[in-house]
Amino acid sequence: MMTSSPSACIELKEGTHVAKCVLMPGDPLRAKYIAEHYLENPVLFNDVRNMLGYTGFYEGKEVSVMGSGMGVPSLGLYVHELFNFFGVEAVIRVGSAGGLQEDVHVRDVVIAMSASTNSGFLTSYDLPGYPAPTASFGMLEQAVAAAREMGVTADVGSVYTSDFFYHPDHEVNKKAKAMGLLAVEMETAGLYLQAMANHKKALSILTISDHIFTGEALSAAERQDSFHEMMEIALKTAVRSDI
Protein backbone atom coordinates (compact mmCIF):
# COMPACT_ATOMS: atom_id res chain seq x y z
CA MET A 1 0.00 0.00 0.00
CA MET A 2 1.38 3.43 -0.95
CA THR A 3 1.36 6.29 1.53
CA SER A 4 0.63 9.66 -0.04
CA SER A 5 0.83 13.21 1.29
CA PRO A 6 -2.27 15.46 1.20
CA SER A 7 -0.70 17.43 -1.64
CA ALA A 8 0.20 14.23 -3.52
CA CYS A 9 3.74 15.61 -3.88
CA ILE A 10 5.21 12.72 -1.87
CA GLU A 11 3.94 9.18 -2.45
CA LEU A 12 5.90 6.42 -0.78
CA LYS A 13 6.41 3.40 -2.98
CA GLU A 14 5.17 0.14 -1.54
CA GLY A 15 7.46 -1.21 1.17
CA THR A 16 9.50 2.02 1.49
CA HIS A 17 9.78 4.67 4.19
CA VAL A 18 11.66 7.87 5.04
CA ALA A 19 14.48 7.94 7.61
CA LYS A 20 14.39 10.23 10.65
CA CYS A 21 17.01 12.51 9.06
CA VAL A 22 16.80 13.69 5.45
CA LEU A 23 19.47 15.43 3.40
CA MET A 24 17.87 17.89 0.95
CA PRO A 25 19.66 19.29 -2.08
CA GLY A 26 17.63 21.55 -4.31
CA ASP A 27 18.33 19.47 -7.42
CA PRO A 28 16.71 15.99 -7.42
CA LEU A 29 19.57 14.74 -9.61
CA ARG A 30 21.96 15.68 -6.81
CA ALA A 31 19.79 13.59 -4.47
CA LYS A 32 20.20 10.68 -6.90
CA TYR A 33 23.96 11.27 -7.01
CA ILE A 34 24.26 11.27 -3.21
CA ALA A 35 22.19 8.09 -2.93
CA GLU A 36 24.19 6.24 -5.57
CA HIS A 37 27.65 7.38 -4.44
CA TYR A 38 27.36 7.53 -0.64
CA LEU A 39 24.50 5.35 0.61
CA GLU A 40 24.54 1.58 0.97
CA ASN A 41 21.53 -0.21 -0.51
CA PRO A 42 19.62 2.95 -1.50
CA VAL A 43 15.93 2.44 -2.26
CA LEU A 44 13.81 4.95 -4.20
CA PHE A 45 10.84 5.98 -2.05
CA ASN A 46 9.44 8.87 -4.12
CA ASP A 47 9.52 10.01 -7.73
CA VAL A 48 6.37 12.13 -7.95
CA ARG A 49 7.11 15.07 -10.30
CA ASN A 50 10.65 13.64 -10.52
CA MET A 51 11.40 14.93 -7.01
CA LEU A 52 13.55 11.90 -6.28
CA GLY A 53 13.89 10.58 -2.74
CA TYR A 54 15.97 7.63 -1.51
CA THR A 55 16.57 5.85 1.78
CA GLY A 56 19.77 3.93 2.49
CA PHE A 57 22.55 3.52 5.03
CA TYR A 58 25.67 5.54 5.85
CA GLU A 59 28.13 4.26 8.44
CA GLY A 60 25.46 1.78 9.52
CA LYS A 61 22.72 4.35 10.16
CA GLU A 62 19.64 4.90 8.03
CA VAL A 63 19.57 8.21 6.15
CA SER A 64 17.29 9.58 3.44
CA VAL A 65 18.02 12.10 0.71
CA MET A 66 15.43 13.97 -1.33
CA GLY A 67 15.29 17.00 -3.62
CA SER A 68 13.53 20.16 -2.46
CA GLY A 69 13.26 22.23 -5.62
CA MET A 70 14.28 25.88 -5.76
CA GLY A 71 13.12 28.57 -3.35
CA VAL A 72 11.40 28.75 0.03
CA PRO A 73 7.87 27.85 -1.23
CA SER A 74 9.03 24.60 -2.83
CA LEU A 75 11.30 23.56 0.03
CA GLY A 76 8.66 24.64 2.55
CA LEU A 77 6.06 22.32 1.02
CA TYR A 78 8.29 19.24 1.10
CA VAL A 79 9.80 19.93 4.52
CA HIS A 80 6.38 20.59 6.09
CA GLU A 81 5.10 17.26 4.79
CA LEU A 82 8.22 15.33 5.81
CA PHE A 83 7.98 16.75 9.33
CA ASN A 84 4.23 16.31 9.73
CA PHE A 85 3.26 13.24 7.71
CA PHE A 86 6.32 11.02 7.40
CA GLY A 87 7.95 11.07 10.84
CA VAL A 88 11.07 13.04 9.89
CA GLU A 89 12.87 14.67 12.82
CA ALA A 90 15.67 16.57 11.06
CA VAL A 91 16.48 17.99 7.63
CA ILE A 92 19.94 19.02 6.44
CA ARG A 93 20.02 21.24 3.37
CA VAL A 94 23.00 20.57 1.09
CA GLY A 95 23.02 23.23 -1.56
CA SER A 96 24.88 25.83 -3.54
CA ALA A 97 25.27 29.51 -2.74
CA GLY A 98 26.81 32.67 -4.14
CA GLY A 99 29.74 34.04 -2.17
CA LEU A 100 29.52 37.60 -0.87
CA GLN A 101 32.60 38.22 1.25
CA GLU A 102 36.14 38.58 -0.09
CA ASP A 103 37.41 35.68 2.02
CA VAL A 104 34.66 33.31 0.84
CA HIS A 105 35.78 31.51 -2.31
CA VAL A 106 34.32 29.16 -4.91
CA ARG A 107 34.17 25.56 -3.55
CA ASP A 108 34.35 26.79 0.07
CA VAL A 109 31.94 25.18 2.54
CA VAL A 110 29.63 27.49 4.49
CA ILE A 111 27.67 26.26 7.51
CA ALA A 112 24.72 28.57 8.09
CA MET A 113 24.26 29.53 11.73
CA SER A 114 21.30 31.75 10.80
CA ALA A 115 19.66 33.30 7.77
CA SER A 116 18.44 36.80 7.05
CA THR A 117 15.75 36.88 4.40
CA ASN A 118 13.36 38.94 2.28
CA SER A 119 10.91 36.03 2.13
CA GLY A 120 7.27 36.66 2.96
CA PHE A 121 7.35 33.46 5.02
CA LEU A 122 8.63 35.57 7.93
CA THR A 123 5.31 37.38 8.17
CA SER A 124 3.27 34.16 8.19
CA TYR A 125 4.07 33.27 11.80
CA ASP A 126 1.91 35.11 14.31
CA LEU A 127 4.78 36.60 16.29
CA PRO A 128 5.15 40.31 17.11
CA GLY A 129 8.13 41.50 15.14
CA TYR A 130 10.01 38.92 13.07
CA PRO A 131 11.25 35.43 13.94
CA ALA A 132 15.01 34.82 13.60
CA PRO A 133 15.62 31.74 11.40
CA THR A 134 18.35 29.83 13.24
CA ALA A 135 20.06 26.45 12.92
CA SER A 136 19.73 23.67 15.50
CA PHE A 137 22.83 24.09 17.65
CA GLY A 138 23.53 20.39 18.21
CA MET A 139 23.62 19.72 14.47
CA LEU A 140 25.67 22.84 13.85
CA GLU A 141 28.17 21.66 16.45
CA GLN A 142 28.37 18.20 14.88
CA ALA A 143 28.92 19.66 11.40
CA VAL A 144 31.74 21.92 12.54
CA ALA A 145 33.36 18.97 14.32
CA ALA A 146 33.03 16.79 11.21
CA ALA A 147 34.59 19.50 9.04
CA ARG A 148 37.55 19.82 11.40
CA GLU A 149 37.97 16.05 11.47
CA MET A 150 38.09 16.02 7.66
CA GLY A 151 40.55 18.93 7.56
CA VAL A 152 37.99 21.17 5.85
CA THR A 153 37.97 24.85 6.73
CA ALA A 154 34.28 25.71 6.93
CA ASP A 155 33.02 29.26 7.22
CA VAL A 156 30.34 29.47 9.93
CA GLY A 157 28.00 32.45 10.05
CA SER A 158 24.89 34.07 8.65
CA VAL A 159 23.65 33.82 5.06
CA TYR A 160 21.01 35.68 3.07
CA THR A 161 17.97 33.78 1.76
CA SER A 162 16.35 35.58 -1.15
CA ASP A 163 13.04 34.94 -2.91
CA PHE A 164 14.66 36.45 -6.01
CA PHE A 165 17.27 34.88 -8.25
CA TYR A 166 17.15 38.06 -10.33
CA HIS A 167 16.47 40.81 -7.79
CA PRO A 168 15.10 44.11 -9.16
CA ASP A 169 17.29 46.02 -6.68
CA HIS A 170 20.77 45.69 -8.16
CA GLU A 171 22.33 46.95 -4.93
CA VAL A 172 20.87 44.22 -2.69
CA ASN A 173 23.97 42.00 -2.77
CA LYS A 174 26.16 44.95 -1.80
CA LYS A 175 23.85 45.60 1.15
CA ALA A 176 24.02 41.93 2.20
CA LYS A 177 27.81 42.02 1.97
CA ALA A 178 27.92 45.19 4.06
CA MET A 179 25.93 43.37 6.77
CA GLY A 180 28.64 40.70 6.92
CA LEU A 181 26.49 37.94 5.42
CA LEU A 182 28.67 35.18 3.97
CA ALA A 183 26.60 34.06 0.99
CA VAL A 184 23.26 34.37 -0.77
CA GLU A 185 20.94 31.45 -1.58
CA MET A 186 17.21 30.68 -1.74
CA GLU A 187 16.12 28.13 0.89
CA THR A 188 17.86 28.21 4.29
CA ALA A 189 15.56 30.67 6.10
CA GLY A 190 12.50 28.69 5.04
CA LEU A 191 14.01 25.45 6.33
CA TYR A 192 14.92 26.99 9.69
CA LEU A 193 11.46 28.54 10.10
CA GLN A 194 9.76 25.24 9.32
CA ALA A 195 11.95 23.41 11.83
CA MET A 196 11.35 26.01 14.53
CA ALA A 197 7.58 26.03 14.00
CA ASN A 198 7.36 22.23 14.03
CA HIS A 199 9.84 21.72 16.90
CA LYS A 200 12.20 19.76 14.66
CA LYS A 201 15.89 20.08 13.81
CA ALA A 202 17.53 21.66 10.78
CA LEU A 203 20.87 22.70 9.39
CA SER A 204 22.03 24.20 6.10
CA ILE A 205 25.45 23.29 4.70
CA LEU A 206 26.39 25.08 1.50
CA THR A 207 29.11 25.03 -1.13
CA ILE A 208 30.02 28.28 -2.87
CA SER A 209 29.24 27.65 -6.53
CA ASP A 210 29.91 31.19 -7.72
CA HIS A 211 31.03 34.52 -6.31
CA ILE A 212 28.71 37.47 -6.75
CA PHE A 213 31.50 40.05 -7.01
CA THR A 214 34.50 38.23 -8.54
CA GLY A 215 32.57 36.40 -11.26
CA GLU A 216 34.10 33.00 -10.44
CA ALA A 217 31.64 30.16 -11.11
CA LEU A 218 31.29 26.38 -11.40
CA SER A 219 29.49 24.70 -14.29
CA ALA A 220 26.10 23.01 -13.82
CA ALA A 221 27.78 19.58 -13.96
CA GLU A 222 30.35 20.61 -11.35
CA ARG A 223 27.59 21.90 -9.08
CA GLN A 224 25.76 18.58 -9.34
CA ASP A 225 28.69 16.22 -8.86
CA SER A 226 31.62 17.91 -7.15
CA PHE A 227 30.40 19.04 -3.73
CA HIS A 228 31.96 16.07 -1.93
CA GLU A 229 33.15 17.85 1.20
CA MET A 230 29.70 19.34 1.86
CA MET A 231 28.00 15.99 1.27
CA GLU A 232 30.34 14.09 3.60
CA ILE A 233 30.02 16.70 6.36
CA ALA A 234 26.24 16.48 6.07
CA LEU A 235 26.21 12.68 6.15
CA LYS A 236 28.50 12.54 9.18
CA THR A 237 26.28 15.08 10.90
CA ALA A 238 23.19 13.02 10.11
CA VAL A 239 24.56 9.79 11.56
CA ARG A 240 26.16 11.37 14.63
CA SER A 241 23.35 13.69 15.69
CA ASP A 242 20.94 12.59 18.43
CA ILE A 243 17.96 11.85 16.20
Image: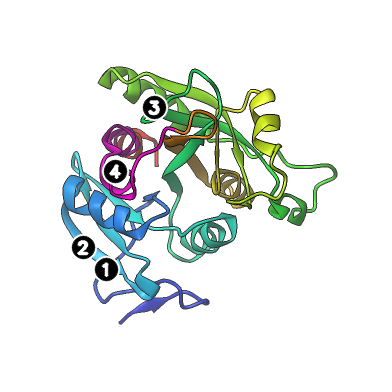
* Residue 124 on image: x %, y %: 74, 56
* Residue 113 on image: x %, y %: 55, 30
Task: From the image, tell me which residue sits under label 3.
Answer: 108
Q: Nearer the viewer, residue 14 or 124?
A: 124
Task: From the image, tell me which residue sits under label 2.
Answer: 43
Label 1 packing within 10 angstroms: few (<14), some (14-19), many (20+): some
Magenta: main secondary structure: helix
Pick out the residue farthest to the right: 128
In this picture, which residue range is highlighted in magenta? 216-236
| Mark 3 or mark 2, earlier in chain | 2
Task: From the image, tell me which residue sits under label 1.
Answer: 16
Distance from the alpha carbon under mark 4 to that under mark 3: 14 Å
Could you say which quadrant of the image residue 206 lies in?
A: top left
**Camera-nearest label, 1 or 4:** 4
| Mark 1 or mark 2, earlier in chain | 1
* Residue 8 on image: x %, y %: 46, 78
Callout 1, which amino acid? Thr
Callout 4, which amino acid? Glu
For residue 11, above or below residue 82: below
Is the Cβ of the residue at disc 1 closer than 8 Å to that at disc 2?
Answer: yes
Q: Nearer the viewer, residue 77 or 61?
A: 77
| Mark 1 or mark 3, earlier in chain | 1
Pick out the residue farthest to the bottom: 1
Task: From the image, tell me which residue sits under label 4.
Answer: 222
Q: Please, what secondary structure does the residue beneath circle 2 have?
A: strand
Callout 3, which amino acid? Asp
Could you say which quadrant of the image residue 101 lies in?
A: top right
**Camera-nearest label, 1 or 3:** 3
Distance from the alpha carbon under mark 2 to that under mark 4: 25 Å
Distance from the alpha carbon under mark 1 to that under mark 2: 7 Å
What residue appears at the point 60 percent right and 36 percent down from the top-left corner?
134
